[in-house]
Amino acid sequence: MVSPFDGNIWFFGGISRSEAELRLKDKRPGMFLIRESNTSRGSYVLCVSENSKVSHYIINKQAETNIFQIGDQTFTSLPDIIQFYKLHFLDTTTLIEPCPKGPIYHPQQSPSTALPPVSLPTTGGELFVALYDFKGKDEEDLPFSKGDKLLVISKDEDQWWTAVHTATGAKGAIPKPYVEKFIPSGSQVVSTGEMNTNTDSEPKFAIATQQRMPSAYDPTQLKLEVGDKIQIIKTHASGQWQGINETTGKTGSFPFTHVQVLKDNGENSMT
């Protein structure tokens, strides 16, 4: 059994976000590593393979107290963080095992598939609008503010896309849940991932059947407690729905597997 106190196993030093993703992409959920932050001096990043994506959780270190903070949790050391998240979920998994060290394969991008230089939204792609502010956590990230328009030029991963900021021409990685497809005024709005808006005359409701504690880093995700009543706003073929938790008043996304749809707003109906 790997000890969380053996930093030689799980600490990868100053590797980049891209290298961390190459090491963890398509690995079993719960495989992880810790690296130094490339944008916040003295801080670290916990990188975890989670359900066909690689999540990056910033670990802020308070220099004056030597306290480590991840989300709203505080710890006295990096091994304490690993020990805690071996028992508690991050978003969809606990920490299972460190990522193996050693050489990795870096795929070479051929000229036919390389992305062309992009500075303005005249090169094609899809135009999206930001739903939230995003400050970025790593040097590859593209910071933006709510309402900014972003040209998505490559959907590299399920949750992270490459985009160009239409106002500044800057290019970088953006989180998919933070943006929505831009539709000109007067057209029907279709949100990210081709979600279907509930257009019935009567709103649809569901009851939460499982507790869900989403990552503190993703404001688009909805927290659920068993028994919460959810008004369904949008559904998605992938199983991620959007709704309003009437218990908390919060709006966000949630997996349909965690709720039971109410028939006629009163009678339970499994879907």
Image: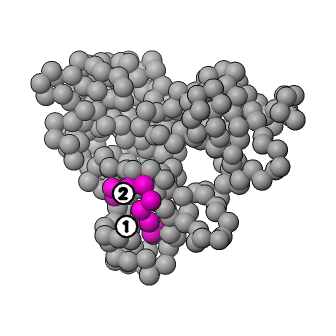
What is the distance, in whole Å, between disc 2 and disc 1 at their CAs?
8 Å
Q: Is residue 133 above or below residue 98?
A: below
The residue lying toward the viewer, choosing from 161 and 131, is 131
Residue, disc 2: 144
Residue 236 makes an appearance in the image: yes
Q: In the displayed orientation, state which residue is furthest to the bottom.
A: 122
The residue lying toward the viewer, choosing from 182 and 31, is 182
Q: Which mark is residue 58?
A: none
Residue, disc 1: 165
Q: Quadrant of the C terminus?
A: top right
**Main secondary structure of the magenta stretch:** loop
Residue 80 quadrant: top left
Q: Residue at x 69, y 33 (%)?
A: 230
The three-letter amino acid code for the residue at tag 1 is His
Tell me where the magenta segment starts and ends, as one range: 142-157
Contact (Cβ within 8 Å) of mark 2 with mark 1: yes
Query: Residue 169: horizontal and vertical position, in percent?
Result: 32, 72
N-terminal of the pair, mark 2 or mark 1, is 2
Q: Is residue 152 magenta?
A: yes
Q: How is the image coloured?
A: one colour
Residue 239 makes an appearance in the image: no
The three-letter amino acid code for the residue at tag 2 is Phe
**Label 2: which secondary element:** loop
Residue 191 quadrant: bottom right
The residue lying toward the viewer, choosing from 146 and 108, is 146
The residue lying toward the viewer, choosing from 146 and 219, is 146
**Label 1: which secondary element:** strand
Query: Residue 128: horizontal and vertical position, in percent?
Result: 50, 64
Q: Is residue 173 left or right of residue 194?
A: left
